[in-house]
Amino acid sequence: MEKNVNHIVRWLQERVQEAGVNGLLVGVSGGVDSAVVAYLIQRAFPDHSLGVMMPINTNPSEMTHAKEVIEASGINGLTLDLTETHDRMYTAISDELKQKNTFAEENDQLASANLQARLRMSSLYTLAAHYNYLVVGTDNASEWYIGYFTKYGDGGVDILPLVEFTKAEVREMGDYLGVPDAILGKKPSAGLWEGQTDEAEIGTSYDVIDAYVEGKEIPAKDKELIEKKHRQTAHKRDQVKQFQRLDK
């Protein structure tokens, strides 16, 4: 683990040097993935790393954990409360759709959640422009494979240091780095709505996805679910489809 951590830290330093920027920033949610990234970027740039907390109707316990990460890691911290911005924006959009009778009630929760992720990423890039930092993503190998991230939200970043590591490996890395036990042991959740957990939304456990990513045998129903999600979310990993001229 020490070897992996040192390799990631060097890689982060190389990316900053390559880009000609001053440092790195990450959105800190109170979950294990963002906690691990916060610790890593603080190691890479003790004086030029920033952890940004961006509550949007966020459970107070998540904010408590996010603050613990900021304090325990030694990273510089900043809080942007985006609750009012999100609520005003989503209400305006919803009201307009309702007037045109095109509001889809069944899509309401997901659309609101995706707006949260995209507002947060827009905020991170605005801060990054002022600090001259790169925006660091928190997706691990298991989430990336099944597309469990918001396109142009938490998936729209400059670099992804954890994308080669499974969820279990990220927890192990967090334990090595000193991430608080309360964060290491909690149920993974994006905190996008009350009672939301990652595994309930995905339909299987991270242990099963980790096993699949590592090439191990898993139950057929889980394999079918994972492979289906991988196919359906290819556009997220490809990001933008680019037009290609016929005469080139």
Image (cartoon, rainbow, N blue to C red):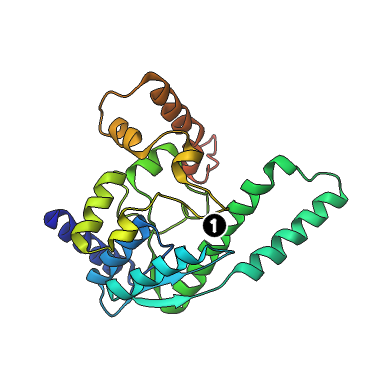
Residue 53 horizontal side relative to residue 40, left or right: right
How many numbered markers are drawn? 1
Q: Residue at x 56, y 72 (%)?
A: 81
Q: Residue at x 53, y 67 (%)?
A: 55
156 vs 63, nearest the viewer:
63
In the depicted structure, whether residue 142 falls above or below residue 80:
above
Mark 1 is surrounded, within 10 Å at the Cα level, by few (under 14), some (14 to 19) or many (20 or more) other residues, namely many
Q: Which residue is mark 1?
A: 117
In the depicted structure, whether residue 106 falls above or below residue 176:
above
> Is residue 155 visible in this depiction of the protein?
yes
Q: Residue furthest left?
A: 3
Q: Residue furthest top?
A: 220
Residue 129 horizontal side relative to residue 81, left or right: left
Residue 94 position within the rendered picture, expressed as x and y whole percent measured from the top left: 76, 54
The part of the image, by quadrant, that contains residue 3 is: bottom left
In the depicted structure, whether residue 26 falls above or below residue 175:
below
> Is residue 159 visible in this depiction of the protein?
no
Q: Residue at x 28, y 71 (%)?
A: 73
In the depicted structure, whether residue 74 falls above or below residue 195:
below
Q: Amino acid at mark 1?
A: Ala
**SS state under label 1:** helix
Residue 128 position within the rendered picture, expressed as x and y whole percent measured from the top left: 44, 72
Residue 89 horizontal side relative to residue 7, left or right: right
Residue 233 position within the rendered picture, expressed as x and y whole percent measured from the top left: 49, 37
